[in-house]
Image: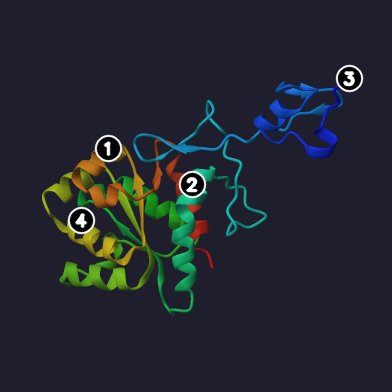
Amino acid sequence: MARCTAPRQGHRTASGRAACPACGGSSRYSGYRAYSSPTYSSYGSDGGSRSGGGGSSRTTKPRWSSASSSVMYTPAEVRTLTPYRENIEKRASVPDLRDTFLCHAWDDRKGAAKDLHDHLESLGVTVWFSEKDVVLGSSLMREIDKGLANSRVGIVLVTPAFLRRVQAEGIADKELSALLARDLLVPIVHDTTYEALREVSPLLGSRSGLSTAEDSMENIAAKLGELVAL
């Protein structure tokens, strides 16, 4: 009678179960339960993170998330944010930096951009935000340059209004160009898609980020807050 190899070799893969002379690929065997591989999130066709396996729960935590944090991530989100975190850590010794520079369309300044700004500030994140950081009468582009130079990471709030501004080569387009040059850019897609973004800015659209189609603005702010915390 064939004996199960699980006690000696384990059935951690489908091929391992298939090779077992007793189990022959079955998912259960006498006295032992087969190991099932976890369901990981994969990127959807729109470039954002999309839950796989019928809506995989967010059960992953990145290394920079504290043990007491209740914020959960998909594996795809951790992969997306890890390079940004590494860049932030490299700049940790630079004094007097804002945590984030918020790039947004002028039309969103009292809507989605302010919502994201308020969520971040409620978490203690310091945000460069044109509505409060550009002094009346000062040069907007000069203030933007200073804000970019003195921030750890840039957040681009991609909305339909933002896409229109970039197409028109307005201020948002100039901010975007400067942020792309620094390679410290987290796109947050809101009320639009990565396909629409790629049509307007292929370079920005090639970057992974977060999307309010997958998570609430409040939860996205919490993840950004953990990302920049040092």
The quarter of the image holding the N terminus is top right
In the image, which is nearer the foreground, mark 4 or mark 3?
A: 3
In this figure, which residue is indicated by the disc labeled 3?
1
Q: Nearer the viewer, residue 56 or 32?
A: 32
Mark 3 crowd level (few <14, some 14–19, many ≥20, 10 Å Cα): few
Residue at 11%, 49% in the rendered image: 168
- Tell me residue 94's x, y (percent): 43, 79
In this figure, which residue is indicated by the disc labeled 4?
172
Mark 2 crowd level (few <14, some 14–19, many ≥20, 10 Å Cα): many
- Tell me residue 208's x, y (percent): 38, 48
The answer to whether mark 2 and mark 1 are in CB contact below 8 A is no
Amino acid marked by disc 2: Glu
In this figure, which residue is indicated by the disc labeled 2?
77
Element at badge 2? helix
Picture layout, residue 183 above or below residue 78: below
Residue at 85%, 36% in the rendered image: 7
In the image, which is nearer the foreground, mark 2 or mark 3?
A: 3
Mark found first going from the N terminus, 4 or 3: 3
Amino acid marked by disc 4: Ala
In the image, which is nearer the foreground, mark 1 or mark 4?
A: 1
Q: Nearer the viewer, residue 6 or 61?
A: 6
Element at badge 1? helix
Measure the alpha-carbon separation of dots 2 and 1: 19 Å
Mark 1 crowd level (few <14, some 14–19, many ≥20, 10 Å Cα): some
Residue at 46%, 47% in the rendered image: 220
Mark found first going from the N terminus, 1 or 3: 3
Which label was assigned to residue 195?
1
Measure the alpha-carbon separation of dots 2 and 3: 48 Å
Amino acid marked by disc 3: Met
Q: Is residue 75 left or right of residue 162?
A: right
